[in-house]
């Protein structure tokens, strides 16, 4: 049965409204997510820079190369632990000394929510991955902080959506002596965006029902 002109117009209007609604929801979701992630990245980098400002880079390198913790080590660790404890979304926070193909852990912060068995110890070595060669090592060589949002994945439910930032600790010659790096979990942000888009979808559905009622 062929549709009458009025029914065709009605169908076109409804389909158009539905498409516009879906596009609006997706656009709104991406916009808010980008804003939140950029805010998180900026705040995290500011925190790392504050930590880096009071650290003697050459003393850190000397500690790693001698294999002996300095007298100030525990105090430094306490500062890092406190920062991580206060940040609900910070999954990892660590201080390392970078080399050409690996870095050496000076410390990794531990919060009360962490499993102590997963925390890296002083002197542990981490071999670079392709990601590190592409992003981390160039910033080490240029003595600069990360200037973009670098998404990372740990493959599990907990760390499936995170981003990382880092900032250098310089020596007396202005070269990178150590790096502070932090990984932030976006689970709370994603939940917030999901709830927000759900509300928008509910509003759009209500408007669509009203429109259908008016048109009929």
Image (cartoon, grey):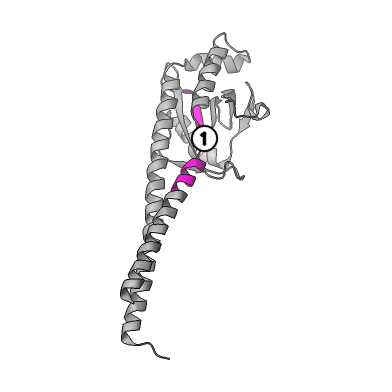
Count of residue discs:
1
Residue 31 visible in the displayed image:
yes
The secondary element bearing badge 1 is classed as strand
Q: Position of residue 80 (x, y in %)?
A: 52, 21
Q: Position of residue 182 (x, y in %)?
A: 50, 31
Q: Is residue 184 above or below residue 11?
A: above
Front residue of this view, candidates 53 and 61: 53
Q: Quadrant of residue 126?
A: top right
Front residue of this view, candidates 200 and 20: 200
Residue 61 visible in the displayed image:
no
The local crowd at label 1, few if under 14, some if 14 to 19, many if 20 or more residues have their Cα within 10 Å, is many
Does the stretch in magenta take in 184?
Answer: yes
Q: Which residue sits at x=57%, y=10%? A: 70
Side of 25 relative to 72 (left or right):
left
Picture quarter with the N terminus: bottom left
Q: Position of residue 7 (x, y in %)?
A: 35, 82
Q: Which residue sits at x=60%, y=13%? A: 69
Residue that numbered label 1 is attached to: 183
Picture quarter with the C terminus: bottom left
Question: Magenta residues, as a range?
Answer: 174-193
Q: Position of residue 159 (x, y in %)?
A: 57, 41
Side of 136 relative to 13 (left or right):
right
Q: Which residue sits at x=63%, y=26%? A: 120
């Amino acid at each position: 049965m062929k549709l009458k002109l009025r029914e065709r117009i009605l169908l076109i209007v409804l389909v158009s409204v539905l498409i516009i609604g879906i596009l609006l929801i997706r656009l709104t979701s991406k916009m808010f997510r980008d804003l939140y992630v950029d805010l998180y990245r900026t705040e995290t980098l500011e925190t790392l820079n504050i930590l880096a400002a009071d650290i003697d880079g050459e003393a850190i390198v000397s500690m790693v190369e001698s294999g002996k913790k300095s007298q100030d080590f525990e105090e430094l660790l306490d500062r890092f632990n406190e920062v991580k404890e206060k940040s609900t979304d910070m999954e990892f926070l660590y201080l390392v000394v970078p080399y050409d193909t690996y870095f050496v852990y000076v410390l990794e912060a531990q919060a009360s929510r962490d499993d102590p068995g997963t925390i890296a110890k002083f002197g542990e070595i981490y071999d670079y991955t392709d990601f590190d060669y592409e992003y981390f090592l160039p910033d080490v060589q240029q003595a600069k902080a990360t200037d973009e949002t670098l998404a990372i994945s740990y493959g599990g439910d907990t760390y499936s959506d995170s981003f990382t930032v880092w900032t250098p600790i310089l020596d007396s010659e202005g070269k990178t002596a150590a790096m502070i790096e932090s990984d932030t979990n976006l689970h709370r942000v994603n939940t917030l965006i999901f709830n927000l888009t759900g509300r928008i979808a509910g509003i759009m559905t209500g408007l669509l029902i009203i429109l259908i009622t008016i048109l009929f």
